[in-house]
Amino acid sequence: MNTKLLILILLKVYNSSGGPYFYRESYKSDVIYQIVTDRFFDGNTQNNDPSESPHLYDPTKTEWKLYWGGDFAGIERKLMYLRDLGITALWISPPIDNTNVMVSYVGIPNGAYHGYWARDFQRPEEHFGTWAEFDSLVAAAHRVGMKIVLDWAPNHTSPADPLDPSFAEMGAIYNNGDYVADYVNDTHRWFHHNGGIEDWDDAYESQYLNIADLADFDHSNALVNDYMRESLLTWIKHGIDGIRVDAIKHMTRGWQTAMADQVNSLMPMFMFGEWYLQDFKNPLYTDAIRFSNESGISQLDFLLNRSLRDTFIFNHTFQELEDALRLTETDYAYEHNLVTFIDNHDMPRFLTENNQTSLLHLALAFLFTVRGTPCVYYGLEQYLHNDTSGGSDPWNRPMMKSFDTTTTAFRLIKILSALKQGHPALQFGQHQLISLDHEMYVYERTFGTSVVLVAINKSDKTHQLTELQTQLPKGVYDDQLYGLLKGYRIDVDSNRKISINLPPGSASIWSYIEQESAFPIIGSVAPVQFRSGNRVAIDGSGFGNRQGTVSFGHTPSLIETWSNNRVLVTVPNITAGHTDVTVTLSNGSKSNSYSVRVLSGPQIPVTFIYNNIPVNNDSHNRVYLSGNVFELGNWSSDPKVVQGPMFLSQNGTQWFFTVSLPASTNIQFKYFVINNNIITWEQGTNRTYTVPANGVGKVVVERFII
Ligand code: NOJ
Ligand code: NOJ
Ligand code: CA
């Protein structure tokens, strides 16, 4: 059967009553748990040393870069533990078939136990289990209301050393068992052959060169694009509920935008990517922000992670944390979609850096009460850490040791998760600073009249605060953590003022939830980028139980389901562009507007190439593509809106850039150059191009002389 048809049928089955309909669109009320599958739990010893890829398993668990036995069946066995912890979504390390052969770096044996060295994107890795075991995990997770997030690493395959063709599998790629190509035998140019990245802050190098020696895909190749689309279909058919995209910084925004559109038009689900950012001064900061705002793929919040670690581990001032929240709120269009975390598989665990569990607890209280979807790295709740050589990769990936449900961290996460799931202010609320100094931080989040007030004191002294203004109505409020972190009860007076003595090393959370909202408020539209005909979810409060209207601009949409805090709609036929979504009740009461991006149609990645660039091309030139569709900025000359800057080829004679464009559409375009704020448009009449109906597009322009 045609796969597209199959997906349509699947969508129908999933969405009709009784089917396992899963709300995948937004994760604003979710708590994610990140698992390195190999290191979690061994649920099936039969797959530990599979014949297809033997000798990569170390039963003694002393070779940190070999497989240790964890698998899909093991995760399934521990689902009740995870549910008890309050987890609603599991991000599992890449489950895709990995390289079969050991690589040796400086004599240390390496297997792809982590999952990031793919071999066959159409199959699961045999160390982790069969399709049946994967399906069983997904079904079991769905039965307890838990989502499965696919870690998707389409940037590369595995280590390849062109100088040593005997090196492991040379990045070989297979299609459902059939050999396709490798880094040496690459007749159809599946891979880039530009060497390894040296300047990680250079956009061109980052995207077109290899991460270390990992064979880097050329996604502008139709074969690669088709292969990846097929693979995504396969994993969607196997029931995944979200996608964590590996190394988004290393692939073009154009290709990834088209990929996200594919997902959102088949089975809308939350996607977030990994763009490692060390600080706000990173040269690619604006690229990272633009990626997040315009690709349809949100991000892991590395900037907040950094400030969180600085503040709670290294005792920087809380001001740094507040600044990070403010800056990200300004620059990210959808900061509530960021995925926040304390540690992960690529950095030392919190307790390795500072072995004070009391500080880790305070960090958790912070993580779960600020904007974004918190993600807990496996074992954090068991204080898991191994401090060998500073505790970073691979020592931050120890085997899960215990499944104790009585640790303070476990109980804390459980309480925080329940709060997050039940509180609109924690899901959609605006952040408001109440008071801070180096060691004490009081903030509030509000949505409508719902309020959460949080007070953290990380010092060993009591902090006395008087006459603080809050949005909490007059009354007495109990600590929502039941005193677990030394929080206590407060009294709010009729002027909404409080005076508090924050105990040393404490966190308190006070909450007010509006019972019945008098008017509609939108807290979330998801996805945030889509096209006419797609399904979109609107979350918030006060929508009432009688069906009203949801408009995109002025155009009403078809309502699929309506409830007091969630409405599902089909996007009407409207002009592409930034569009305001509003909810209007049957009594005429109208909500706030929520701005989203509507694309012009099904997206195709198109690579533009201008040849014969003069070799004396001024290095201050920034070249952009503009054109007559939203995706090309509707003829804007604002570099923030058009596409680019285009890359200059290594030999300096070619400009190129990949853009996501509407399929089967005749477009007009031109480049323009900005040099010292002077804009020079390409001369002559507008160029035209018809974007293909499927596959990839390529436009080659033999440039004339200016
Ligand atoms: C980032 C992943 O998180 C990391 O663990 C991996 O090695 C690289 N991307 C390459 O896939
Ligand atoms: C924008 C558009 O009017 C387009 O048609 C024209 O080619 C460029 N500006 C350059 O003048
Ligand atoms: Ca790449």
Image (cartoon, rainbow, N blue to C red):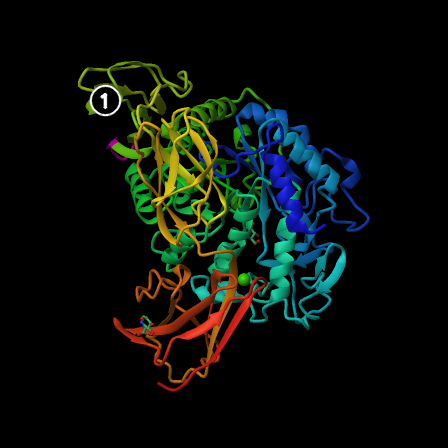
Q: Residue at x 45, y 36 (%)?
A: 373
Asked if residue 438 is among those painted magenta in the image, a careful observer would answer yes
Q: Nearer the viewer, residue 538 or 677?
A: 538
* Vertical side of 7 occupied by 74: above or below: above
Identify the residue at the far bottom of this view.
705
Left or right of 686 in this view: 399? right
Left or right of 304 in this view: 689? right
Q: Position of residue 136 (x, y in %)?
A: 70, 34
Residue neighbourhood size for the residue with mark 1, other residues' Cα within 10 Å, grouped as few (<14), some (14–19), many (≥20): few
| Element class at badge 1 | strand
Q: Amino acid at mark 1?
A: Gln
* Vertical side of 681 occupied by 84: above or below: above
Q: Which stretch is magenta?
A: 434-439
Q: Nearer the viewer, residue 679 or 107?
A: 679
Q: Position of residue 155 (x, y in %)?
A: 57, 58
Residue 70 visible in image: no
Q: Position of residue 683 (x, y in %)?
A: 34, 80
Left or right of 184 in this view: 645? left
Identify the residue at the far right of this view.
51
The C terminus sits in image quarter: bottom left
Figure quarter occupied by ligand 2: bottom left
Residue 131 sits in which quadrant? top right
Residue 132 visible in image: yes
Asked if residue 676 is among those painted magenta in the image, a careful observer would answer no
Q: Position of residue 135 (x, y in %)?
A: 70, 37
Q: Which residue is mark 1?
A: 464
Q: Residue at x 77, y 41 (%)?
A: 47
Q: Nearer the viewer, residue 200 or 78?
A: 78
Residue 313 sits in which quadrant? top left
